[in-house]
Amino acid sequence: MTTWDPQQYQRFQKERAQPFFDLVNRLPDGEVTTVADLGCGPGTLTTTLTERWPHATVWGVDNSPQMLAKTRALPAQPRLHFVEADIAGWFPPRRLDRIISNAALHWVPEHRAVLQHLVGLLTPRGVLAVQVPNNHAEAAHRILRESTQQEPWRSLLAGSGERFTIQTPRWYTHTLHSLGCTVQVWETIYYHLLSGENAVLEWMKGTALRPTLERLGQRLGQDGQTAFLDMYGQKLAQAYPAGPNGTLFPFRRLFFVAQRG
Ligand SMILES: C[S@@+](CC[C@H](N)C(=O)[O-])C[C@H]1O[C@@H](n2cnc3c(N)ncnc32)[C@H](O)[C@@H]1O
């Protein structure tokens, strides 16, 4: 399980929040009394669900103690609960009218089994709404893969590289149909204009680099992490030169909204 650094993750809070709102805006209204946000992270976005559905009970679920610690600083609300659990194994006290998962499901393997589990938690006509990053063709990820394939990193990092699960839009469409849902699937490319020095490195440090940095920390301590970040950071600075208004970082994301029949 990856160790998260909520402060680093939240450095680009506005950019990371936009897909959540774009996803939630596509959800149908109707009678909603139970909602879950799976892989809720620091919980800031989860709280907005209590505004969208003021009469609903909302659960935020995450398996990272570091992320959940952040939720304790949020104003307490009687209908908002945070739970430490795995997305693939959590059972809510009641069936759910809406399940939302923003930028989390790609950390969970076996998507057919997970989707079957999640659809099974929905009430009739309940909706599952998911966003996952689908940016692996982008230079930042390609350079990361290439760098971790070169020595000495290859041997040090064996088995710890990018381990995300993302299927194709076609796969999600067919799989969710086969689970008895109607489905909308779409992709959006966000062109984030990031501020700060070597901004793409800072972005990657908050998410995709976590497993790599964790393994290097275990093997070599902070010096190993610093050496890797220097090498990778130089390559990123070349691939993403800063312009007068910031650094442009294209980011492709895959969305689906599935309604149980
Ligand atoms: C990139 S963050 C997204 C956080 C939040 N949804 C947001 O949009 O800001 C991914 C979150 O998924 C959580 N996560 C990853 N795998 C998980 C799993 N198997 N079960 C529960 N949470 C998981 C991580 O701990 C992390 O908080």
Image (spheres, rainbow, N blue to C red):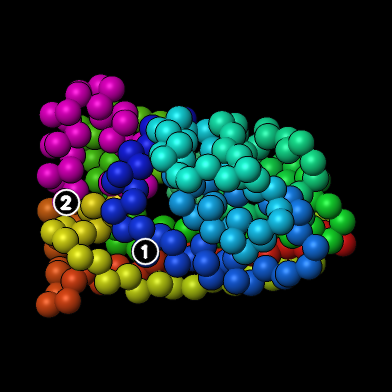
Q: Residue at x 28, y 22 (%)?
A: 218
* Quarter occupied by the C terminus: bottom right
> In the rendered structure, which disc, 2 or 1, sits on the residue that comes first in sequence?
1
Q: Which residues are magenta?
A: 205-233
x and y percent of residue 42 in the render? 44, 44
The quarter holding residue 180 reads: bottom right
Residue at point 59% right, 61% down? 51
Q: Secondary structure at mark 2?
A: helix
Left or right: 113 in relation to 169: right
**Left or right of 75: which side holds 120?**
right
Is residue 216 within the magenta segment?
yes
Q: Which residue is mark 1?
A: 14
Q: Nearer the viewer, mark 2 or mark 1?
A: 1
Query: x and y percent of residue 31 in the render?
Result: 80, 63
Callout 1: 10 Å neighbours few (<14), some, many (20+)? few
> Quick check: 237 above or below 29?
above
Any part of residue 200 in sight: yes
Task: Left or right? Give the position of 140 relative to 42.
Answer: left
Foreground residue among 12 and 168? 12
Q: Which residue is mark 2?
A: 233
**Location of residue 89 in the rendering, given as x and y in whole percent from the top left corner:** 68, 33
